[in-house]
Amino acid sequence: MSFHPEPELRGHTLVVTVSSHDGRPVLDRHAYASLARTFHEAAVNDEVRVVMLRGLAGCFCLGGDFSEFLDATKHRELIAAVTDMFRMLATFPKPVLACVDGDAVGVGCTILFHCDMVIASRGSTFRVPFVDFGLVPDAATSILAPQKLGYAGAFRFFCLGDTLGAEDAKALGLVGEIVTQGSAEEAALARAKQLAKKPVAALLQTRSLLKGDTAVLCDRIDHEITLFQQALQDDTTLKRLQRIARLAA
């Protein structure tokens, strides 16, 4: 059994792996809680100037842990952990980059909307199948996606559940750079190093001005997660999730 790497400080860049602690490319309630703690600690650590998110080899993240969606005894802890993590990410004061190499699905994709730059390999894909599952988007993407992709692009991406390749994701604005030589991680680390060399106060103030009022995002995160929790209590949705889980097994 493999385990995910612990956060690693490289110069002034904190490299964080998006995965469960038992080495699966999914996020369970423990992984959400761990990410929230990591971001909280990074926010107050002056040595950390940039955070870079990465996935496991060949896959960024395949979304949430379906077994927790189907287990009502875990819903309260799951919802609390998801809410804490995304509120922490929405209000995080420092630049966040992501390097995507492979699939980014569900929450593995919505987390990217909080990143200041997304750098992807040419073969990466992006999909948010919430509607197909009978669920709603999370992470305040009902605000962030129309801002970044435009309403029409966000509607197609979320409501049709289309899979985007790296080129299409870049054309829409989700991906900032596509790496054709070397690795996405090397390219993202190079960008992080550039940012870490900037005057700290000016960089953080400029980022804050660009992001605007994050309280609006936090309110939307709370509203989305309430709808998400209600959907998990719907019999039709649960049957759909059970069927999808069987097909994926």
Image (cartoon, rainbow, N blue to C red):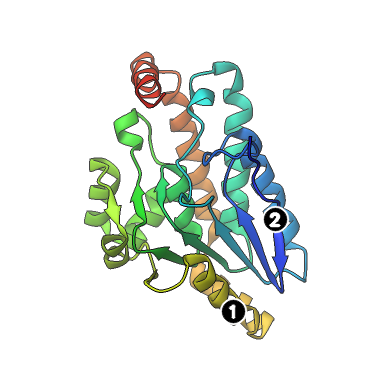
**How many numbered marks have been drawn onto this rendered protein structure?**
2
Per the image, the residue denoted by label 1 is 195
Mark 2 secondary-structure assignment: loop
In the image, 31 versus 141, the foreground residue is 31
- Quarter of the image where the N terminus is located: top right
Tell me the crowding category of disc 2: few under 14, some 14 to 19, or many 20 or more residues within 10 angstroms, Cα based: some
What distance separates the C-alpha of mark 1 from that of mark 2? 19 Å
Is 94 located above or below residue 86 in the figure? below
Per the image, the residue denoted by label 2 is 7
In the image, 233 versus 96, the foreground residue is 96
Query: In the picture provided, is 136 more to the left or to the right than 116?
Result: left
Query: In the picture provided, is 41 more to the left or to the right than 126?
Result: right
Is 189 located above or below residue 197 in the figure? above
In the image, 84 versus 13, the foreground residue is 13
Residue 34: x %, y % from top left: 68, 44
Residue displayed at 77% across by 71% down: 47
- Quarter of the image where the C terminus is located: top left
Query: In the picture provided, is 83 more to the left or to the right than 46?
Result: left
Residue 122: x %, y % from top left: 34, 63
Mark 1 secondary-structure assignment: helix
Q: Return the mark for residue 90.
A: none
Q: Residue 68 appears in which quarter of the rendering? A: top right
Tell which circle, 1 or 2, labels the residue nearer the N-terminal end. 2
Q: Amino acid at mark 2?
A: Pro
In the image, 155 versus 181, the foreground residue is 181
